[in-house]
Image (cartoon, rainbow, N blue to C red):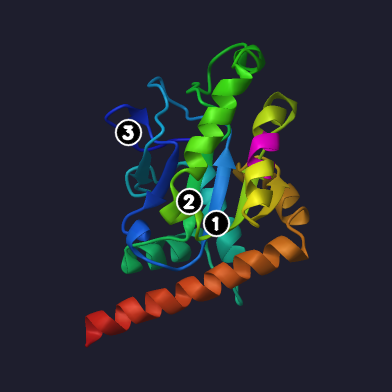
Amino acid sequence: MEQAETKRGHACLISYAGTADASFPLILVVGREPNEDLPPSEEAGDYNFRKSGRCAFWNVAYSLFGSVANPPRSTRQIKAEAEAAGASPILFADALPITLRHAARNKVAQRLAIEDAAIERHVAAVFSHRSLINRVRVIILSGLGPSFERSVAAYRRLAEERGIALAELPFFYPTNMPAIRERLGNELRSHLADVLHDFDEHARRIAAARAA
């Protein structure tokens, strides 16, 4: 997954544009590790889907979010609403405190070689950004198989401590969309719909203020 670059590397938690300055509820989507060479950072940062418009992971997250609307909205529509509002309800983070190119070999070995303490510290860093995390209503873990069991346990524990719902879905890639939709479930769909409703209200207020 692509992420925002900070002075120390790639931010551990990223949001869109002015999201941090708003108050609507959020969704946190957790991927595997950034597709990059720079080391990860414990800082928060931002993302820009205009600069990385072809990032499949981000696009599937927006597509899934739009699918709970009535009628459903496309990825393009949801992104356009976020751009117009200057904010988005979707946050992104990663499971592991490493960066790893898609073409890298021995990914499993590299993931398993990470010390337990480093994983705990990484997930704790994600949750340390309280101004954003306190607004999260649901965490979606995307494609975190056996190599990520320690990360899943850490996210699950901290989510439970904070009363945040957590769901595990197949990896966010376009060809996995049928399996993702099949695993969506009524509870997760309800959480996403609630967040979308509140974000729509925020977007309407922003539009009305600009028109006044």
Q: Secondary structure at mark 2?
A: strand
* 3D distance between C-alphas at marks 3 and 1: 21 Å
Q: Secondary structure at mark 3?
A: strand
Q: Residues within 10 Å of mark 3 (few under 14, many from 20)?
A: many
Question: Mark on residue 5?
Answer: 3
Image position of 164 (left or right of 145): left
Residue at image position (57%, 42%) is 30
Rendered location of residue 55, percent (x, y): 46, 41
Main secondary-structure element of the magenta-colored stretch: helix
Residue at image position (49%, 55%) is 90
Residue at image position (58%, 29%) is 120
Residue 46, above or below 206: above
**Quick one: label 2 or label 1, which is nearer the N terminus?**
1
**Quick one: label 3 or label 2, which is nearer the N terminus?**
3
Residue at image position (57%, 61%) is 65
* 3D distance between C-alphas at marks 3 and 2: 15 Å
- Residue placed under numbered mark 1 in the picture: 27
Q: Amino acid at mark 2?
A: Leu
Q: Residues within 10 Å of mark 1 (few under 14, many from 20)?
A: many
